[in-house]
Amino acid sequence: MKKVLIIILAIFGLFAIGFMAIIWDYIYYPMIKYKAEDKAFLHLKTTYQEDFVIDSVTYEKQFGEHTGSYYITAHPKAHKDIDFSMYVGQDFKVSNDSYKESKWRNDMIQEYAPLIDALSPGFRSYAVNLPIPEGLINKYNIETNYGDIRKQNENNEEYLFMGAAVDAGFNEQQSLEFGYRVAEFMKQRNLKNASIEINFYPKSFLDGLDENNRRMSVFDFRSKFFKDSLPFRISYDSRINKTKTSLTEVKSPEDMKPFLVYTRNK
């Protein structure tokens, strides 16, 4: 009888613990998310001496990757186009603040804007990704422009994804020349590794799109309008062993031939 009672109490205890965990995760912690928001505001203000806008605060429940933390997204008040995130734990300590990375990526994206506008006037659809080592994040302050960081370091990498507006009759040879111009631009940027993906879209197709579609991210645009792009793209990556070619080896449009990829039958 004693053993049965112990088992019953153990089962009841487990249910009680589970019930309390649910109460904490689904009611208590979401209710006090304003404390996490206040902590995030204080961290940002004291760290960067700027004004910020908190866009969202979401409590990550115990089964997520960042268990028991508040996931917070924000942007600087003066720059709505710089989105970043951070986590605030149950102990209200801030971690994974990505403002520096987002700010430096935005710096880099702006550096590419003249090239994109010259190659694809009237249609700006692109993204540039780069890995930023933790050592650089700790070494430089937020006021440092990414261009200055790039010039002072030797292991830079940049990955360009682009959708380009092209005239009727645009052909494979013109795509090689297009890709070469991008490679020449990136060659001047002191990069250890680089990748280039360019999808081509007829101007007649783009002219028929509304602003919502034209402002779509380059990745969403590529996915949604894959069948409307030309049946070939430029796909270069200096890291792939099969066609491993550094930017310095790209000396003419003909050197881009290994990177002309057919996406479907003509």
Image: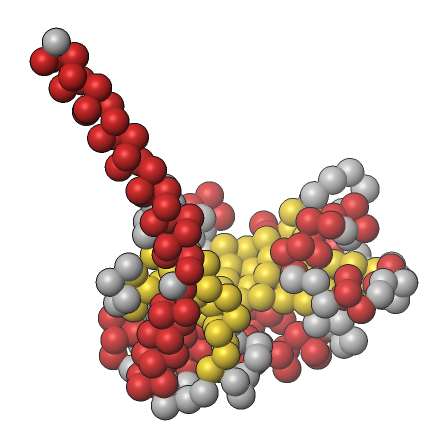
Determine if residue 106 is in view.
Answer: no
Residue 167 x, y percent position in the rendering: 85, 65
Residue ranking furthest to the front: 1
Q: Is residue 55 left or right of residue 173?
A: left
Residue 219 x, y percent position in the rendering: 63, 56
Nearer to us in this view, 231 or 136: 136
Determine if residue 99 is in view.
Answer: yes
Nearer to us in this view, 140 or 251: 140
Identity of the residue drawn at 25% across and 75% down = 138
Identity of the residue drawn at 77% across and 62% down = 213
Identity of the residue drawn at 80% across and 69% down = 211
Nearer to us in this view, 193 or 89: 89
Residue ranking furthest to the top: 1
Identity of the residue drawn at 30% across and 74% down = 137
Q: Quick check: 4 above or below 236? A: above
Question: Which picture quadrant has residue 205?
Answer: bottom right
Question: Which picture quadrant has residue 151?
Answer: bottom left
Q: Quadrant of the C terminus?
A: top right
Nearer to us in this view, 216 or 34: 34
Residue 225 x, y percent position in the rendering: 76, 51
Q: Is residue 111 left or right of residue 201?
A: left
Q: Quadrant of the N terminus?
A: top left
Q: Is residue 83 left or right of residue 204?
A: left
Q: Quick check: 84 above or below 111? A: above
Residue 230 x, y percent position in the rendering: 78, 52
